[in-house]
Amino acid sequence: MKHSMYSFIRHSTLLGLWLTALLVMGSTQAMQAPDVVVKDTIDKMVNNIQTNRAVYQKNSSQLYAMVERVLVPTLHLERMSKLILGKESTRAASKQQMAAFVSEFKTYLMRSYATALLEYTGEEKVIYQPLKLEPGADKVVISAALIASDGQEYPINLYMSNRRDTSWRAYNLDVAGINFVSIYRSTFGDIITKKGVDGLIAELREKNAKTPY
């Protein structure tokens, strides 16, 4: 299972870019259509990486800080955490345990994918499918094809919602049939079964203390 998670994280050189850039939706863009926000944000992230690559390669803390600064405020982190833990573990967990898990998972997520951003070469591209957003809908799936620098094509679905919110935020991602929430739920579920939620939090905290990833 560890191999499966590693494969998911490193599925392509642009996976980190896709996960990060597609989720970045600033409050000033709240009224924009989800697909417009996605396209604009990818352009900004690409420019940022290309401009600061040398700095980020030497100082991973600056890379992590940039990713956390632009991503975390616009991510359905609590919703994602509940989906990953599953209903049973979420209901059994205390508020303190949930807060601790969200915090450690946030750090783990940012650091895991931030490094992948540096693998962007500039030769990759994304081909979008037309957005299907019904009037009044509070959830949408943005579909696209990610073309890697070697020509390999990866179908992608990004799940977004603005339910009880002022902007569109992402809570799940599917890359070439590999589901973000499902892969983490399976891996973390094994740890919870053996060590409980506190054990999972402890493992994430230990991993987060080791940098860079």
Image (cartoon, grey):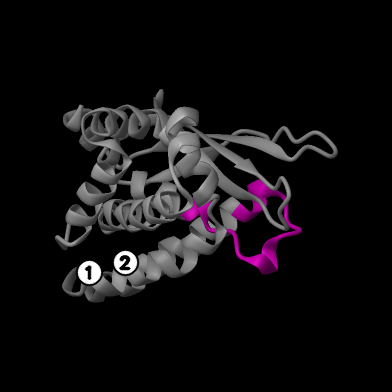
The residue where tag 1 is placed is 60
Q: Residue 45: x percent and y percent?
A: 44, 62
Instruction: Identify the residue at horizontal 48%, vertical 51% (top origin).
Output: 95
Does the image show residue 88?
Answer: yes
Q: Nearer the viewer, residue 155 or 103?
A: 103
Q: Amino acid at mark 1?
A: Ser
Where residue 189 sits, quadrant-wise, is: top left
20 lies left or right of 207:
right
Magenta residues?
Answer: 21-37
Nearest to the observer: residue 127 or residue 61: 61
Q: Residue 35 appears at what percent x and percent y? A: 64, 46
Task: State the mark number for residue 181.
Answer: none
Classify 161 as above or below 112.
Answer: above
User: On the rendered image, what quadrant is the C terminus found in?
Assistant: bottom left
Asked where in the image residue 59 lies, by quadrant, the reply is bottom left
Residue identified by numbered label 2? 64
193 is higher (above) or lower (below) than 10: above
Compared with 64, 176 (above or below) is above
Mark 1: secondary structure? helix
Amino acid identity at mark 2: Tyr
| Residue at position x 28%, y 41% in the image | 9
Q: Is residue 173 visible?
A: no
Mark 2 element type: helix
Q: At 46% from the left edge and 28% from the top edge, which residue is drawn?
A: 88
Q: Is 206 on the left or on the right of 12, as rendered?
A: left
Kindly indicate whether the residue at mark 1 contacts the one at mark 2 (C-beta within 8 angstroms).
Answer: yes
